[in-house]
Amino acid sequence: MSLFTHARSRIRRSTALAAAVLVVAGAMTAGSAVAPSSPASAAGTASISGTVSAPDDVPASWLEGTNVYAYRIGGGSFVATTQVDSTGAYTLAGVPSGKVAVEFRPSYGTDLIAEYWDGGARIEDATPILVSDGAQIDEIDAHLEHGAWFSGTLDMAALRSAHPGNDRYTLWLTSADGREVISSYSDRLWYDTMDFSFPGLRPGTYRLAVGTHVLDGISTMTSPLSSVQFVRVGSGSAVTLAEREQLRSLALAALPLPSRISGTIGAAGLTLSGVTDVGAVRLYERDGEDWVLLPGYAQDILYQKSVAYSVALTPGEYAVGFESINRAIPAATEWWTGASTITEATWIDLASGEHRSGIDGGIVPVGSPPATRQSGPNRFATSAAVSAASFAPGVPVAYVANGWKFPDALSGAAAAGVLGGPVLLTDEESLPGVIHDELARLKPKKIVILGSEASVRKGVATSLSLYSADVQRVAGEDRFATSAAVSAATFSPGVPVAYLANGWKFPTRSPEPPRPGRSADRSCSPTARASPAPSPPNSPG
């Protein structure tokens, strides 16, 4: 995407009391760039000149005043500018040495398509011009063609009424997938209707989006979005324009947005700055088989460790990305819930009037391992999947515990972490087929049954002997004694710490198993009350 692109746009309020702020951008996300007003400092001694032409039916006044820009390739910085004269000629003076791209951008009010020399739509497509000190480069010419035109009126009354606290809006024209902002502009949300106009468009498919903000005191465009939507044009939001097509005087309306997604974004492990954005919450809406990026940020994070967001949306299916937006601070994007790509993300089916909260995530330093999900159709298959993803064949030990009762498996987790083996879950009476398969793959040197025969019957022990000649049982008269027995069989005196947790309540018990090279801490189950433990529900976990 280019820093500045071919489309120009302007908003005219229905009352015509004031002109809107104009922002034209290409590689921008949520208005990170504005039209250049002065070149970067380091002026050079070279010049670039040429002639700009157009079809015969174009008035001379349309060409006169066409803006010509030179950009440094690689950094995208703007280094020189001029305008075309009445004959179509131009000269860019003070061009520094290096590779540059030259853009020809018609002034507002024409339907001519902007382009880079020679014919590129984006700076990535531009043919680079190699400039040396003092060089005079000529014949850098352009021929601008007529483009399509998309314009109309947008009714904002329902949206304003549903969200009265929002005092700003941004209007975007994006590519079909939403990843390129063709043009955008922002203003105060004072009126119920607004006129929009996007001339000079190349043939293709576009989407019109509108978002509302509460001004954050820095910039409307980077204020967190309070609402965002693709404007519906007929039955969908995509608008396809043919060459030179005039799709004008449309009467469109923004929807009131009865649904909402909220959560937090964090930036764990990053060095945060109070000056620039580090990451942002980006929203993707499903359109058939495609995920389309909604423009703007639901929230951006600067120096905070964590910040909340809440954005109103149309009912539909969404994916939420927690994305790096600062090249100077390398960070990895995460998708809710913990996925590393959008295809692996857990998507949200948002019903009308529904508020989905707790959609949390964050960005992490590049190189951090992505979050992955290990699962199966039930708790036994899940334990086998975790083992298969973590351990190679020939492990020194595999622990087996009752999958319907948490204490024995939990007590064995620390021991398994220290000795380098998995904890696999079994039914009380028989060994599940997925555990048979995983033990056959693992070929453990030793198998340790956690708990007494009341938890894991003799028949299971017999099955386990098929996979190791050394099958042991570590048990006590109850869950507390079993916890102590596992600790005694694994840890020597003088451990740096021992963790205690309620042996009757599962939620408080989530110790991290120690890994080789870490301190050999242990977890025990103290008696919390004298009454017997309730029987767990016989359902998969």
Image (spheres, rainbow, N blue to C red):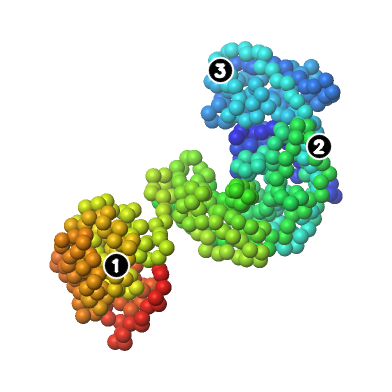
The picture places residue 161, in percent across and down from the top left corner, at 75, 62
Foreground of the two, 482 or 310: 482
Q: Residue at x 60, y 48 (%)?
A: 289
Locate residue 171 relative to residue 436 in the image: left or right: right
Which structural element holds mark 3? strand
Which structural element holds mark 1? loop
Question: Marks 3 and 2: CB-CB under 8 Å?
Answer: no
Q: Which circle's residue, 1 or 3, is located before the other in the chain?
A: 3
Query: Can residue 80 be seen in the rendering of this structure?
Result: no
Quarter assignment of residue 102: top right
Residue linked to disc 3: 130
Foreground of the two, 286 or 425: 425
**Separation of residues labelled 1 and 3 (CA atoms):** 72 Å
Q: Which circle's residue, 3 or 2, is located before the other in the chain?
A: 3
Q: Residue at x 66, y 66 (%)?
A: 353
* Residue 246 - label: 2
Amino acid under disc 2: Gln
Amino acid under disc 1: Leu
Foreground of the two, 2 or 479: 479
Question: Marks 1 and 3: CB-CB under 8 Å?
Answer: no
Amino acid under disc 3: Leu
Residue linked to disc 1: 431
Foreground of the two, 59 or 538: 538
Q: Is residue 116 above or below residue 311?
A: above
